[in-house]
Image (cartoon, rainbow, N blue to C red):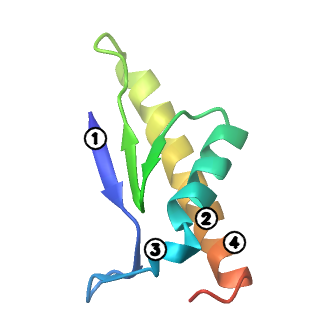
């Protein structure tokens, strides 16, 4: 199991306004790209299978990166950063 905290500013750890529901924006990108990640506030949680190959992990990490990049672009387009 793993989790990521979505923050407005990584160096300072500044959080997004919870009313923006950035986690749900990210969740939408995840589901749209075939990746199941739960949004708990602005925390993204993933629970991969216990039996997973290195290649599948690489694919999963690639999808996570893509979805995070899409979320960043979406948040910027909405003027939230």
Badge number at residue 71: 2
Badge number at residue 74: 4
The quarter in which the N terminus is drawn is top left
Measure the C-alpha gap from mark 1 to mark 3. Answer: 21 Å
Q: Secondary structure at mark 4?
A: helix
Circles 1, 3 touching at the beta carbon (< 8 Å) = no
At a point 27% along the width and 86% down the height, the residue shown is: 11
Mark 4 and mark 3 lie on one chain; the one further toward the N terminus is: 3
- 71 w.r.t. 81: above or below: above
Q: Which residue is mark 3?
A: 18
Residue 18 place in picture, x, y as percent = 46, 74
Q: Quadrant of residue 58?
A: top left
**How would you rate the neighbour count of disc 4 (Cα within 10 Å): few for under 14, some for 14-19, many for 20 or more?**
some
The quarter in which the C terminus is drawn is bottom right
Badge number at residue 2: 1
Camera-nearest label, 1 or 3: 3
Mark 1 and mark 3 lie on one chain; the one further toward the N terminus is: 1
At a point 57% along the width and 35% down the height, the residue shown is: 35
Mark 1 and mark 2 lie on one chain; the one further toward the N terminus is: 1
Circles 1, 2 touching at the beta carbon (< 8 Å) = no
**How would you rate the neighbour count of disc 3 (Cα within 10 Å): few for under 14, some for 14-19, many for 20 or more?**
few
Circles 2, 4 touching at the beta carbon (< 8 Å) = yes
At a point 37% along the width and 25% down the height, the residue shown is: 48
Q: Secondary structure at mark 2?
A: helix
Q: Quadrant of residue 56?
A: top left
């Amino acid at each position: 199991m793993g989790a990521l905290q979505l923050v407005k500013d990584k160096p300072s750890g500044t959080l997004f306004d919870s009313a923006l529901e950035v986690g749900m924006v990210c969740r939408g990108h995840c589901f749209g790209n075939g990746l199941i990640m739960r949004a708990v506030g602005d925390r993204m949680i993933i629970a991969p299978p216990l039996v997973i190959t290195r290649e599948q992990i690489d694919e999963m990490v690639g999808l996570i990166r893509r979805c995070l990049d899409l979320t960043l672009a979406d948040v910027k387009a909405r003027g939230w950063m």
